[in-house]
Each structure stands twice: as structure tokens, then as C-alpha cells.
Amino acid sequence: MKRLKRIAIVCALIICVSALVACGGGGLDEISKELTNYNIEASYDDTEHKLTASMTVDYINGYDIELDRVEFHLYPAAYREGARFAPIEKSDEAKAYPSGKNYGGITVSKVTVGGNEREVTVSGSDEDILCVTLDDKLLPGGRVKIGVDFEVKLAGVRHRLGYNGKSVNLGNFYPIACVYENGAFRNDPYYSTGDPFYSETANYNVTFKYPSKYKMAHTGSGTFAADGDVATATVTALAVRDFAAVLGEFESRETTVGGTAVKYYYYADSQPDASLKAAADALTTFNDKFGKYPYSTYTVVQTAFLQGGMEYPNLSLISDAMNNSTYIDAIIHETAHQWWYGVVGNDETKNAWLDEGLTEYSTSLFYALNPDYGVEFDKRISDALSSLMLYTELYKPGYNADTSMDRSLAEYADNMEYTYMTYVKGQLMFDNLRRIIGDDSFYAALKDYYTSNYLKTAQPDSLIACFEKSSGRELKPYFDSWTQGNVKLF
Ligand SMILES: [Zn+2]
């Protein structure tokens, strides 16, 4: 995600602080054979703001243990009235719900295992986990067909899942399998801080019906047909870690970068060519510096959104509330997420710095490599440092701020602390490292990190090992001092 600047007092004091913060090839066919398949048939009722869906998951046990059940996140549950973990911080509610607070939710009406109906069991810390008990233990590599019928009520909200007048955001709308690790399924709730998602790559076949007045921006590649007032999208996405879509009355632009169709959907942009160019230039730059983007499509879509933007596989949501420079900045940031979140996954709940720190620094590197954008790299970094100093000085007198980064989303006091630690301090950590080991070692490590974690989930130690290998230096203590909050920042 790209966060909008959140500290009015800091903004007032530093007029020139840039938009530091605001808020993820070949072989896909082969790799996809080993992955779980989600087949979703859904239709969206624009009058009731309701989505009705039937999903069949051809689930593959990709773990080295036997499973007696499969658990799924029910993220839309966070939007319901009375949710323990609301998706939006109290201080952001007025902005997120311009027409007043309202609610959504999800109802699972039917669950089948191997075609046989089972009781619907919803649990978790916030009634947000669907637990599907299997008839027989599923061996490593084994497959089972799980059916889930569900209905999602959308809230009127400028967030990942919601309707907003001009567009309908469909992020995290379906039950998605929890990651299994350390003897249990990870069933973290929908924290309002950060991007509280963590999932494995999978394949998606989605048939989606919606009012034909809309166009649909989405993960994957699709074909479209219209029959009167109803349009039908048929979408396929291979080896992606989520599926999302946005409906809207869009205009569109398209270009191609290295075999990838780059699309831009918008409804209020006075410089759509510049926006499309930013997405294409970012794709070109990151293809060159990190490794080739493997997918055939990448779509940027303008929509109503609380923060600057939000990343999904093959799809970036960019807020319609930004001006030209922050808008372009968000496009570049979210495009960088296609590498750091999309192709190289990470645990966004536990290791957010790996996600946002590297992505925000990649955004800065883009400007260094594309001087025609007129954003001075050194100034961007010095602004980040000034901003962090002010944050600790103004909000944590005596510099007693908890500046650790290796903590879960649940352990941050609020979105502001999270933003400063993961985006701002995170990017300073990477910049300092690049100055220590040099450009050649730095970029070689990122290419190695990309290749060795391609379509998998990376751990921090994997990234550190790549930097150690490329530089020939022991860097674990360096990373530890930054991530554990011991480094002297100023
Ligand atoms: Zn981000």
C-alpha cells in the first residue's frame, strides 16, 4: 500500500517534505500445475451492493505435513457491524465513509468437501475464519475439492472492498486459504494497520457478471461479453497470490512493455498519458534492475481509496484524491510492489518492512534512474530522514520511540508509527546499505533475491543472505541493529 502523509503538524513544519509515505515470465504454465486452483463464479448486484458467488477450490496440500482441515480467511467479515477488528482506524473513519459509517459483511451459505455438504464452521478471533474439516487426512501433494457458496454485502467505503459512487473495489472479497506454518494455519485478523494479508500463489478462473455500464480492471487476463445490461468477464490468472478487481465507468489507455500489456483505467485524470507512462516506465526500470515481470498483464486503476494506493497481483489501485505528483508517486510505488509482494511474496503481517521498506526504496531508486521525472533522489532520502527525526522528536520526546521494525502489525501503536518505521526508516536502512556495499552488490543482491524467491514467500534472512553473498560482508548484525531498533539514527 502507499500511505498518504499522516502528520499534519510535520507537513506544516516542513513545506518541502516530499510524498515520502502514503500508503506488491516464463514458466508460469509449468509452475501453475503445482498450485491450488480457485474457480469462482460471481455476480454483482449494483442496487443492493451485493456480490453472490459460488467457489470451488481444487486445493493442493503444498506442505510437508498431513492436513485434517483447511482454513480460509473471511476478510469481508471485518466490514460488518460489531467487528472486533475494523478495517479502518477510528481517526480515518470520516474520510473513509464520506456518506457516514455503514457496514458490509460476508455470509457463507454452503460448504462442500469432495461434493458432499458439510456444516459451515466459522471461527477465528473475529468470526473471520472458515474452517473446513476434511473427510480424510490430506497427504503432502494431495488434492481435495472444497466448495464454498457465499454472499458479500459491500459497505459504502473508500477502502479495499466497497462501493463508492464512481467505482466498486473488490479486494479480498472471497474466502482465501490461510498459510500453514509452524504447526497451524495463520489466521491473523484484519488489522487496520498496514496490509494484513498473507497468502500463497495459486491459479484463478473467475467468471464475473456485473452491470454493463461498468468496465472491469482485474488481476489476470480476461475476455468480456455484454448481453443487454449484464456484462460477463471471464478471467484467468496463473501463479498469483490473490485475485482482485475494480468496477467503474472508466476510460482506458494501453501500451506494451516487454510482452506485458500495461493498462490504465481512470475516470478523472487530466494527464492519463503521463499516468500510463509512469506505470510503463516503472515496469521497464524494475524489469531491468530486479528481474523480468512474468505476467502478460499489468493494470493500474484509479478509484476511490482512503490511502494513496493498494497493490494486488497484476493490479494497482490508485486513489482519486491525489494530485499529479503524488498520483505518479503512488503508481511507481504500487508497481514496485508487483516485485516485492507480487512475485516475491512476504509475510506482510509480520515482516512489513520487507514489503514496504524495500518497495518505498525501489520507488526512490526509480527516480534516480529516471531523472526526467524531476524528483531528486538525494532530496527524497534527506526528506525521509528529516521526517523521521521530526516524528520521533515531536511524538516521542527524548527519542524514546520504539523504532523496531521486526514486529507484527498488532504491535504497532497506530498507522502513523507503522508508516514511519516500515516505509520511512525501512527505506533509510536500504539506502544506508547501498552506500556501504555499492550499487553493483546492491542490485546483484536484489536480482538474486528475486530469482531465488520467485513466486514463493521470502523471509528476511533470505534477503540478508543475498546481500551478504553479493557483498562478501557479514550483514546480519547491520540488519538486526536496524530492525530491532538499536541503530543510532541521528
Ligand atoms: Zn506499499
Image (cartoon, rainbow, N blue to C red):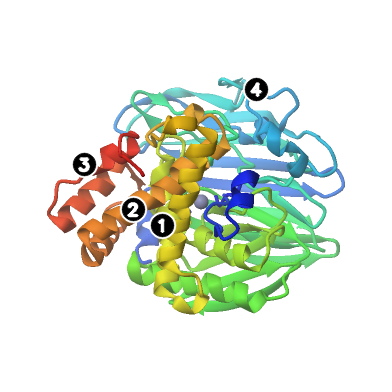
- Whether residues under marks 4 and 2 lie with C-beta atoms below 8 angstroms apart, the answer is no
Q: Quadrant of the C terminus?
A: top left
- Whether residues under marks 1 and 2 lie with C-beta atoms below 8 angstroms apart, the answer is yes
Residue at x 72% of width, y 70% of height: 269
209 or 168, nearer to the observer: 168
Beta carbon of the mark 3 residue lies under 8 A of ligand 1: no
From the viewer's perspective, is the residue at label 4 or at label 2 nearer?
Answer: 2
On screen, residue 475 versus residue 259, left or right, reads left
| Label ID, residue 84 | 4
- Amino acid at dot 2: Phe
User: How far apart in space, not on screen, are marks 3 and 4 (Cα)?
Assistant: 38 Å
Image location (x, y in percent) of residue 263 = 60, 71
> Mark 3 or mark 1, which is nearer the start of the sequence?
1
> Mark 4 or mark 3, which is nearer the start of the sequence?
4
Residue at x 66% of width, y 36% of height: 88
Q: Is residue 460 visible?
A: yes
Image location (x, y in percent) of residue 188 = 50, 28
> Mark 2 or mark 3, which is nearer the start of the sequence?
2
User: How far apart in space, not on screen, are marks 1 and 3 (Cα)?
Assistant: 19 Å
| Label ID, residue 430 | 2
| Label ID, residue 361 | 1
On screen, residue 29 versus residue 383, left or right, reads left
| Label ID, residue 309 | none
12 or 151, nearer to the observer: 12
Looking at the rendered structure, the secondary structure element under dot 1 is helix
